[in-house]
Amino acid sequence: MNFFKKLFSKPLTRTLTVTSSNGFHLRPIAQFVNTAKAYNTEITATFQSKTVNAKAVNTLLSLNLEKGDSFELVAKGSQAIEALDSLEKCFFELMHDDKEIILPEQKPHNYQSNLLHAKSITAGIAIAPLYTLSQQEEYKESHLSFKEAITLAQKELENLYTSTKDENANIYLAQKELLLSIVEDIDTLEAFEHRIQKESQALERGILESKRVDYLDILQRVKHHLGYNNVTKLPNTPSILVADDLLPSDILRLEKSQIQGVILKDTTLTSHTAILLRASGMPSIILKQSLSDTKTSVILDADVGVLLLKPTEEDISKAQTQQTQNQLYKQKAYKKRLEPAYTKTGKQIKILANVSDVTSAKLAKEEGAEGIGLLRTEFLFNAVKPTVEEQQKAYEEIFTLFTDITVRTLDVGGDKALPYVKLPHEDNPFLGIRGVRLFKTHPQLLEEQLLAIFKAAQTSKNIKIMFPMIATIEDFVEAKSFAYNVADKYKLNISHILFGMMIEVPSTLFLISEFNKVVDFYSIGTNDLTQYLFAIERTHPTLSTDTLSPVIFSALEKILKESTKPVSICGELASEPKAIEKLLSLGLEKFSMSAKNISKIKEIVRHL
């Protein structure tokens, strides 16, 4: 007994290294904290002699952790080992999934007049006078208490999260978690403002300095319910807005205004403000130079990353021509998004969507997807294990949207943690128990998932099931046999369901002729295939791979040449404009990608 008391009283540690180029920022921190809160144990994080509570979003943010930084995670209590195992896996997953923000490719220019060089946030061209942001706080008496205002602000953020139809929804969920962590022991607006000021100052001069706007944003939401309204004066004529920075909540107002473009001075390319500006499609840049309002039009060309304060008539003519071409191209692509994509030679290329939940499936339908090439089922498996009925309901809702759907079985384990999936600590989780390997370690979990899919697919045609992380013929045969045994056990007809595999493990490249005998289809996951081919983890702090490397295309060529079964591609390479022509020349005819890229890629295909 004394031994266990000593064991549990001794702190246990793990060293975690930030591998995302975005740093350990608000959104992944919010998810990390939610995992930490599930354990009844004291958990702290230490970096450069500073120790903070790892169960609070604001304190973890204050560490300002950037790519390459290593910090000590310390747990003390009866659940210390379990907590550290779970948090380490959660952290690996967050770093792995935190994609590098793709910025507009700045093109060369041929303007004549003097110009200022800037960093492009969102591509596009705006031609209008400059207008400096003007804001003023007004007060109208409110009968709400501080606690009521906090509750309403939380509900606002929850509503924004559920109503936002893209990956940016997580911004609002993270802000809600940040709000909860700050107000835990506060009961007055004055104390709240003081805490906001203190916490946001902790981010100064660090990689996460741009996240200070999230503190200001949640402060403004709470103050609004207490009668303090931040009135933003916007012009009633087309203008380019100039501001030091904007709050994420400001972007929605700009979209409904006469603002044609945005110039910010103090933000960063990875701030939540910048992310939401990109989602809005509004041309925007970062320019450190101070600017004054103008009566005449300037040119903001975010395609090339410049601002022309005194453009010549010829410069304006060039910008207007390019602006018109850009708008026509986008309008044409979006207008034709629901139409199939044919190459110039008349070959139809199917453009499908990568989908991660019911909401993104509906968005994919709106954006012109011809099916789902990759249904990531992990969205159903959160802190609490879903029932078969809950899974079945979600699958049925998605299955009614399309007639061509490929479902990937659960791809967790190793780097992707779930509290009810107990796995041993692994030094290299990307080469550990994950994907199809769960059939051996957690058969009940996979049986329930397959049962839910089979039940949902009883009235749906063209449902395909795909197994991830297949490395050998035996992996696939055993997984497929497992699936048929589940169907037999519950007396379900699955004769209409096809079974295929992800090609992402290099060993499969040398087994295509054998796989042809047992699989119904292939889907190439270029993200994992690339990292395994080069033995470089995608979010490594110092190493990187060339996504357009000839090695990748050689591997794809080998697959397509040797395969006798249908092949599609669902990795990020499928939506890379520079790769489309080469992929088509190799013979690929089915591409799966995020919904926002569908209209653009369809239009590229039509010109090849």
Image (tube, rainbow, N blue to C red):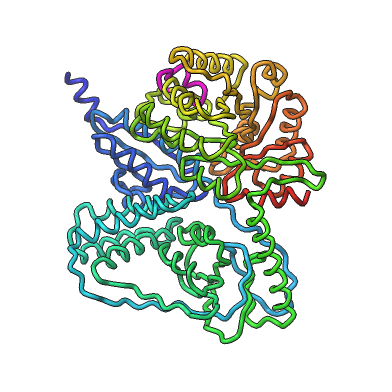
Q: Is residue 298 left or right of residue 4?
A: right
The secondary structure that dominates the magenta segment is: helix
Task: Identify which residue is drawn at 29% across, 62% down.
Answer: 196
Q: Is residue 112 left or right of residue 22?
A: right
**Is 441 in the magenta?**
yes
Residue 573, quarter of picture: top right
Task: Identify which residue is drawn at 59% across, 78% down.
Answer: 128
Question: In the image, is residue 521 above or below residue 249?
Answer: above
Question: In the image, is residue 17 above or below residue 492?
Answer: below
Question: In the image, is residue 18 above or below residue 392?
Answer: below
Residue 298, quarter of picture: bottom right
Question: In the image, is residue 145 above or below residue 453?
Answer: below
Quadrant where the N terminus sits is top left
Q: Which residues are magenta?
A: 433-445
Q: Residue furthest front?
A: 459
Q: Residue furthest right?
A: 345
**Where in the figure is residue 124, as x and y percent of width and height?**
62, 65
Q: Nearer the viewer, residue 261 or 99?
A: 261
**Where in the figure is residue 360, as x and y percent of width and height?**
50, 45
- How many numbered markers are drawn? 0
Q: Nearer the viewer, residue 114 or 330?
A: 330
**Is 373 in the magenta?**
no
Q: Nearer the viewer, residue 425 or 324?
A: 324
Task: Identify which residue is drawn at 35% across, 78% down.
Answer: 136
Q: Is residue 376 left or right of residue 516?
A: left
**Where in the figure is residue 540, as x and y percent of width and height?**
54, 40
Task: Identify which residue is drawn at 35% across, 55% down.
Answer: 157
**Where in the figure is residue 94, as x and y percent of width and height?**
45, 41
